[in-house]
Amino acid sequence: MAVSQPLPDAPTGAEYLRAVLRSPVYEVAQVTPLQVMEKISSRLGNTVLVKREDRQPVHSFKLRGAYAMICALTEEQKARGVLTASAGNHAQGTALSATRLGIKSLIVMPVSTADIKVDAVRNFGGEVFLYGENFDEAKAKAIELAQQRGMTFIPPFDHPAVIAGQGTLAMELLQQDAHIDRVFVPVGGGGLAAGVAVLIKQLMPQIKVIGVEAEDSACLRAALDAGHPVDLARVGLFAEGVAVKRIGNETFRLCQEYLDDVITVDSDSICAALKDLFEDVRAIAEPSGALALAGLKKYVQQHNIQGERLAHILSGANLNFHGLRYVSERCELGEQREALLAVTIPEQKGSFLKFCQLLGGRSVTEFNYRYADADNACIFVGVRLTRGRAERQEIINDLTSGGYQVVDLSDDEMAKLHVRYMVGGRPSKPLRERLYSFEFPESPGALLKFLHTLGTHWNISLFHYRSHGTDYGRVLAGFELSAEEPEFDKHLTALGFDCHDETGNPAFRFFLAG
């Protein structure tokens, strides 16, 4: 079995190249596919390729660096075992690497770590010790235990052997396609970006390497601005695989020297990239795994890049399945395919209808309304876009010209996370009200038909609709009605939509009824 030799503290580029070429990672890691993403290539006017590190045995690239470092240990170090701290991919990579080499491994994980990740580490043969409320507390405990037990701490990114192990990915990339113009690499602690950049620049320096960071954990950008690694005050946890407060010293040195550029993206853009990966190659990535594609898309737009071969790294797929609910909700916003607006309209019959007519036939994705006073109503509305921000501004201009007050909430994080689900409440005065649920086909004109048939004859006191991409849309609507309204029943029949009287529903009585 080939065993890589320990590297000096600050290897040169040539020394990193030799370490990559001699790396033993393929004793456990796979050569992962490089696939063309046909749909997004057509959309962006470039050939977009994805490096599928989700195909590794641990579903992420982290296996490469962990195995490379553990192999480089002395026999005495191996006999004492290895230890690390991680809430995710590095933990699994370390556990599997140690198990394959017959070495004991102890993984310290925060108490709040999801069961799926804890179980995965145990399945790969690692012993799990749950400690601390966050990664920093778990890491401090891991270092303490390593000193007490004489075990070797395996850092997740800031070590030459780990960096060289990650660099094997770049070697594969060049062998699979030597005509790439740019490579986009996700950046957390910088191990993958450093390894990819130093290898590519030794062999094909004309290829541009661009690091991509999440806006709420951009520790490399902060270090570049300061000229040295610095601590971020806080990091966002959506893309937890890159949620690192401080970039490593060695990874920063290499990124500063070899990266051509760095770009940051927001969570909505990451969600949109997750959707692109699924639609194009049927890959379900974790948020940090889609980070590089999100950066690629933004970079192409900012620099008007056309006709190039652009590669990005799908770095991992260890996703908490329930997180897909958030991703599904936000990906339309990330692609600028949905506008969220607060619109004040007069509280009078026909107002809904006039509002929808001003939208010019555009598809309404969400409509929240609750009666508040006799003069005006404020509605929360989502509108599907086909032309991004320019079309959003057109809609706002049209509504403003039509006499409506409009507030754009598309970029308001609180509105997107909370307010959209809390619109409503109890009316400010007693209402003679009946509540109905409707199912209608998700087709153009269905909502207008509903408003034409019912909204111009009876006052709508509550309205909620949200498109979920299925064949049928679901509306919850309240009407001011007396106990006997035979004409209303006739109009319901004429409408032809499946409906149910929900007036006696306890949830309505507890939370919404007057």
Image (cartoon, rainbow, N blue to C red):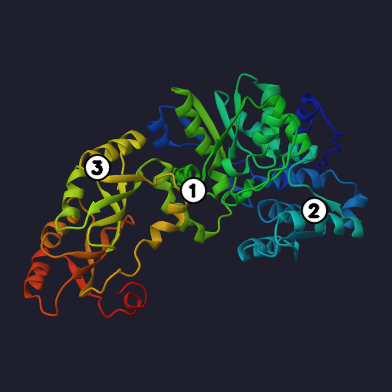
How many neighbours does mark 2 have within 10 angstroms: few (below 14), some (14-19), or many (20 or more)?
A: some
Is label 3 or label 1 in front? 3
Tag 3's secondary structure? Answer: helix
Is label 3 in contact with label 1 (beta carbons under 8 Å)?
no
Looking at the picture, which amino acid does disc 3 mark? Answer: Leu
Inter-mark Cα distance, 3 to 1? 40 Å
Query: Residue shown at 86%/38% (left/top)?
Result: 6
Residue 336 figure quarter: top left
Q: Is residue 370 left or right of residue 182?
A: left
Query: Please, what secondary structure does the residue beneath circle 2 have?
Result: loop
**Residue 79 at x, y percent in the picture:** 90, 56
Report the front residue among 386 and 413.
413
Which residue in the structure is indicated by mark 3? 399
The quadrant where residue 249 appears:
top right
Identify the residue position indicated by label 2 in the image: 101
- Examine the image and state in which quarter residue 121 appears: bottom right
Of the numbered discs 1 and 2, the one sitting upstream in the chain is 2
* Amino acid type indicated by mark 2: Leu
436 horizontally vs 44: left or right = left
Residue 110 lies, with reference to residue 296, above or below; the image says below
What residue sits 63% from the left and 49% below the top? Answer: 241
Q: Looking at the rendering, in which quadrant would you find the N terminus?
A: top right
> SS for tag 1?
loop
Separation (CA) of disc 2 from disc 3: 66 Å
Tell me: 379 left or right of 126. Answer: left
Question: Which numbered disc, 2 or 3, marks the residue closer to the eye?
Answer: 3
Of the two numbered discs 3 and 1 on the same chain, state the one appearing first in sequence. Answer: 1
Give the numbered dot on residue 283.
Answer: 1
Measured Cα–Cα span from mark 1 to mark 2:
30 Å
